[in-house]
């Protein structure tokens, strides 16, 4: 009997020692997944907005851009905050059940997406990590299974912070995400996950063999029907863009023009004519005319005047057809050259309803939304440093902002630990008495 009791005691001991290890492993895996998911979407909040609008267009229920932005930012921030709290073992019951509710919604949704394939990828990690719809569903099943285990065992293992400090970490996470999202929305993403990064040669090489040119076929959907179109025969706005496929040629990401092609009003490829390989050039990018405030045309025309006085040029690239170009020319009184491009290609180059890309000798120098440019700078066209001063060091800002955030979290952790030490000291002192 004694031996049996001893074996039972050892078995219970091993079982109890396994629980903390399993709980912390689940916390880290689930927390890290939510952290990466929320942060990658918030960094490129415009990309997440476009993805949501793509879903809504397929389902036939478009919503105002402001509402979509609010929903995208709120979901991204919630994912990050919950993931960070889970990884630290904070709000053990609240975080677990909230995550479980989120997965209860998204797991069936990703199953539907995997079966029906309404969009090429679900956008769970933005452009940072593109996963197939099937892989996304499998990932959600695994995370859901881990959360089921945590629903029963998470409260059995203490976290790294006391309840008196964990709320402060939650607020730090929220403020950090707000800062990341607002910078990405008003200027450009802090980290560029797309092919057209700063330093990319955007201009076409005229010396290249024409047999190496890249031709695309664009896939659009309307009323559940998908059709393929060439670049010179794109459908009207009632169709929803789904994907693009390479017909001929190949792409070299990050080194040269990675598939960005512009067309003149006749639908002919005018990339080499529009994007200069020498001198300065500003690209005005407007993916959708419906998102543009007509009052902004004054600032755009001032930018065109400024570039002309500097000896450079400005061209407009719009995600529309020749009729849209004529409409824009009438509304804005544009005196600069206008071209068209596939709207998704424009969104890949720069984010925003209206954005500028500064090119020197065909190489991208910086990208900015129109609203982030101080037009007072245009009063000094002779100052050669003005355009260079608009360079946006996004990755540097991201490192500084993230360092500040993590530093504050470490301070909270240190204060929390010191508080625990003081509490333990007085508890032991009272016990001795």
Image: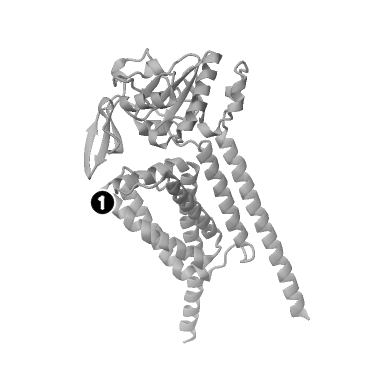
Residue in the image at 47% along x and 56% along y:
29
Is 68 displayed left or right of 238 in the figure?
A: right
Q: Secondary structure at mark 1?
A: helix
Query: Mark 1 packing: few (<14 Cα in 10 Å), some, or many (20+)?
Result: few
Residue in the image at 41% along x and 37% along y:
291
Q: Position of residue 236 (x, y in %)?
A: 27, 34
Q: Position of residue 33 (x, y in %)?
A: 46, 52
Snapshot colouring: one colour
Q: Position of residue 378 (x, y in %)?
A: 59, 23
Note whether 223 is above or below 202 in the view shown.
below
Note whether 68 is above or below 362 in the view shown.
below
Is 69 displayed left or right of 135 in the figure?
A: right
Nearest to the observer: residue 418 or residue 357: 357
Check the image and name the residue furthest to the bottom: 1
Instruction: Assign the C terminus to one quadrant of the image.
Output: bottom right
Residue in the image at 50% along x and 20% along y:
304
Q: Examine the image and state in which quarter residue 331 appears.
A: top left
Note whether 410 is above or below 46 in the view shown.
below
Residue under label 1:
115
The answer to whether residue 47 is visible is yes
Q: Position of residue 107 (x, y in %)?
A: 35, 57
Nearest to the observer: residue 49 or residue 377: 377
Say how many tags the image has: 1
Nearest to the observer: residue 273 or residue 305: 305
Nearest to the observer: residue 44 or residue 166: 44
The answer to whether residue 129 is visible is no
């Amino acid at each position: 009997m004694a031996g049996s009791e001893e074996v039972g005691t050892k078995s219970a001991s091993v079982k109890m020692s396994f629980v903390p290890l399993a709980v912390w492993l689940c916390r880290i895996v689930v927390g890290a997944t939510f952290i990466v998911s929320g942060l990658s979407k918030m960094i490129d909040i415009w990309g997440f907005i476009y993805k949501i609008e793509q879903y809504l267009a397929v389902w036939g229920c478009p919503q105002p851009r402001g509402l979509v932005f609010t929903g995208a930012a709120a979901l991204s921030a919630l994912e990050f905050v919950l993931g960070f709290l889970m990884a630290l073992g904070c709000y053990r019951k609240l975080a677990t059940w909230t995550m479980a509710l989120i997965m209860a919604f998204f797991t069936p949704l990703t199953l539907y997406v995997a079966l029906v394939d309404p969009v090429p990828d679900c956008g769970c990690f933005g452009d940072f990590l593109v996963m197939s719809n099937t892989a996304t569903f499998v990932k959600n099943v695994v995370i859901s299974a881990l959360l089921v285990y945590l629903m029963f065992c998470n409260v059995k293992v203490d976290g790294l912070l006391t309840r008196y400090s964990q709320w402060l970490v939650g607020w730090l996470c929220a403020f950090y995400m707000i800062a990341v999202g607002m910078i990405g929305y008003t200027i450009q993403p802090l980290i560029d996950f797309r092919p057209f990064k700063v330093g990319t040669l955007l201009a076409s090489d005229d010396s290249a063999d024409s047999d190496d040119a890249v031709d695309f076929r664009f896939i659009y959907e309307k009323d559940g029907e998908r059709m393929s179109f060439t670049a010179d025969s794109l459908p009207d706005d009632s169709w929803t863009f789904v994907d693009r496929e390479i017909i001929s040629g190949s792409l070299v990401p990050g080194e040269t023009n990675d598939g960005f092609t512009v067309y003149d009003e006749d639908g002919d490829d005018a990339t080499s004519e529009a994007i200069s390989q020498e001198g300065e050039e500003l690209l005005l990018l407007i993916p959708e005319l419906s998102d543009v405030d007509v009052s902004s045309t004054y600032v755009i025309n001032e930018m065109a005047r400024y570039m002309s006085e500097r000896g450079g040029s400005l061209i407009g690239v719009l995600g529309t057809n020749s009729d849209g170009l004529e409409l824009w020319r009438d509304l804005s009184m544009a005196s600069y050259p206008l071209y068209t491009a596939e709207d998704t290609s424009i969104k890949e180059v720069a984010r925003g309803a209206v954005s500028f890309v500064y090119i020197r000798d065909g190489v991208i120098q910086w990208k900015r939304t129109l609203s982030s440019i101080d037009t007072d700078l245009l009063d000094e066209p002779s100052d050669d440093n003005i355009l260079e001063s608009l360079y946006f060091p996004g990755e540097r800002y991201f490192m500084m902002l993230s360092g500040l955030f993590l530093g504050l979290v470490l301070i909270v952790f240190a204060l929390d630990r010191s508080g625990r030490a003081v509490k333990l000291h007085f508890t032991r002192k009272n016990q001795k008495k």
